[in-house]
Image: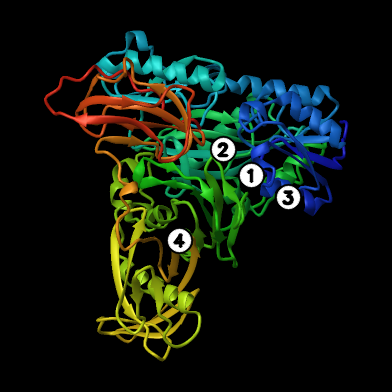
Amino acid sequence: MRRDVIHSLLVANRGEIACRIFRTCRDLGITTVAVYSDADADALHVREADLAVRLPGSAPADTYLRGDLVVAAALAAGADAVHPGYGFLSENAAFAAAVQDAGLTWVGPPVKAIELMASKTRAKELMAGAGVPLLAPVDPATAGPDDLPLLLKAASGGGGRGMRIVSELASLPGELLAAAAEAASAFGDGEVFAEPYVERGRHVEVQVMADAYDTVWALGTRDCSLQRRHQKVIEEAPAPGLEDALRTRLHDAAVAAARAVGYRGAGTVEFLVSAEGRPYFLEMNTRLQVEHPVTEAVFGVDLVALQLRVAEGEPLPASVPPPASGHAVEARLYAEDPARDWQPQTGALLTLEVPDGPGLRLDTGYVGGDTIGVHYDPMLAKVIAHAPTRTEAVRLLAGALERARIHGPVTNRALLVRSLRHPDFVAARLDTGFYDRHLADLTTPGAGDPATAALAAALAEAVRVTGTPGPAPTRFGAWRNVPSQPQVKRYRSEPDGAEHEVAYRTPRTGTPEPYDAPGVRVLAATPDRVTLELDGLTRHFKLRRDRDRLYVDTAGASYTFTALPRFTDPATQTDPGSLLAPMPGTVVRLAEGLAPGVAVEAGQPLIWLEAMKMEHRILAPASGTLTALHAAPGHQVEVGALLAVVQEDPDVTPVTASAPVPEENA
């Protein structure tokens, strides 16, 4: 067989996965080439690459999804191979063919395998012939009550786009139209199919690796059941609690699926496992998965290195995979607010520090000082823990996330820690409805001590302002603050909005101390570190300030505070019923017939805003009349922009709400 030694590799992707592939390339002595959009001009993957080629524009459709530009970039940089990463063009057969037609080595599966697995409906037909267990399809036109609940899925693509759960027959026609419209928009293919929705099912997958010499490895199982909006949040290997017979059946089915399409390289065969332990084929992802590090940890392999080896025409190093060892868990750290419908967050990422140590791994496309923009997925990093047992791996990962310092936009870090320590997760009672049941409890304010953290923030601020020991009165216009007298600071904690008022004074010793706080003693105070003794217990607080925000990290908890003025600024007030943009983005749709003077109902979706690959519904805050509308499809809006105003009147008769459009742009 022809062997093509790779000397220079272009990664047709961005962020975390590009950085991860570059890491292996450096270990192998391969020159790395990045491509980047204008929005990514200073991104970490660009800084880490040996060479980089600009793709003019910022939107994915103009840059990372332009296969012709990516191929031209590879040729211009002198690359001899292309790795697609995941997402974007990674499962695009036409792109794979274009890479090969240009004389470049394609680090991925055969074009034919991609084509066969690209349509879920065609893939299921092929898998049925290979003896892989399947869910029986349901014809939506003849579906009856006994077929409910149904799951509607886009035939092409993935990531939750075009996916709907239907529990009532009356809603089936509208959901079919919405799913088809989303699928057509996301993948250029509006085909949608229906199958039974398996309640309390687990998402279990098998990593396969195949070469051109008839060797196919099944590298164990992964459980990816903890999902939000049909996208994975926490993954682990091996999938816990599976009987040996089921594990063997999954391995055999995955190998059969790979052989049925003449597969080569890394791929993943995904299954839904019912509560009764019956597996059903979902799809085959013809690419590297986001969660591949847990498999690498358990089997001690580098899947990217194996991809490159196979692409060069070499066989896998053995006829059977290496033995598995221990357990690994991965958590996806997102810039998003789980308590507010998973709203993605943007802005400056001031600090991203995750503890390093035995068994821990960080895959990221960001460092402190980078900016999180609006154009791409809000995932900041993946944190992976590997240990001899599941209990140890889960504990190690939760502890690392808890001790991490992350300053800037709101993240899901607290949710991840709580999820890992939730009794159902600890006991491996896993299914895809985990967050549907537990999200409210997982996002309620914790049992921490924000009041003491606010006190530490105020003391650090006092040291920062005075700068030197001793009293230092500060004048504000006609007001005179005397440090030796009690001073008051007000803070609002984020994202819950709770307010905290702290009183302190600065005696002539120069060290600020709390006012009227029995049992609290200041042991040390600097602008970035405060040590307090609380009823005989010493606690340390690390602080960072960015304009009016203060970030406080202490053992077991982290807090973000916004310093509040002593008096309310009238200019910050908005009219009741105002609908403000929760993030920068693009208005993609208005409710049918929405116009000033129209009656609306509390909770009715009025405006759909797209940002960071997700669609978010702006809901009517109350029943009443729409008195102003400032949004229109295609408008770019900034965070806090006034979109509309609803005047409350519970007696009005609202217009009929149109069928909601998809919320996920995965």
Tell me where residue 40 appears, x and y as whole percent. 66, 41
Q: Amino acid at mark 2?
A: Tyr
Residue located 43% across and 51% down the image: 412
Question: SS for tag 4?
Answer: helix
Residue located 68% across and 36% down the image: 37
* 1 and 2 marks in contact (CB < 8 Å): yes
| Mark 1–mark 4 distance (CA, rounded to whole Å) | 24 Å
Residue 15: which disc? 1
Tell me where residue 622 appears, x and y as whole percent. 21, 32
Tell me where residue 572 appears, x and y as whole percent. 34, 48
Residue located 88% across and 31% down the image: 2
**Of labels 3 and 1, the one closer to you:** 3
Question: SS for tag 3?
Answer: helix
| Mark 3–mark 1 distance (CA, rounded to whole Å) | 11 Å
| Mark 1–mark 2 distance (CA, rounded to whole Å) | 9 Å
Q: Amino acid at mark 1?
A: Gly
Residue 376: which disc? 2
Residue hosting label 3? 47
Residue located 33% across and 72% down the image: 452
Q: Amino acid at mark 4?
A: Ala
User: In terms of image quadrants, where is residue 163?
Assistant: top left
Question: SS for tag 1?
Answer: helix
Residue hosting label 4? 398
| 77 vs 637, nearest the viewer | 637
Q: How is the image coloured?
A: rainbow
State which tag comes first along the sequence, 4 or 2: 2
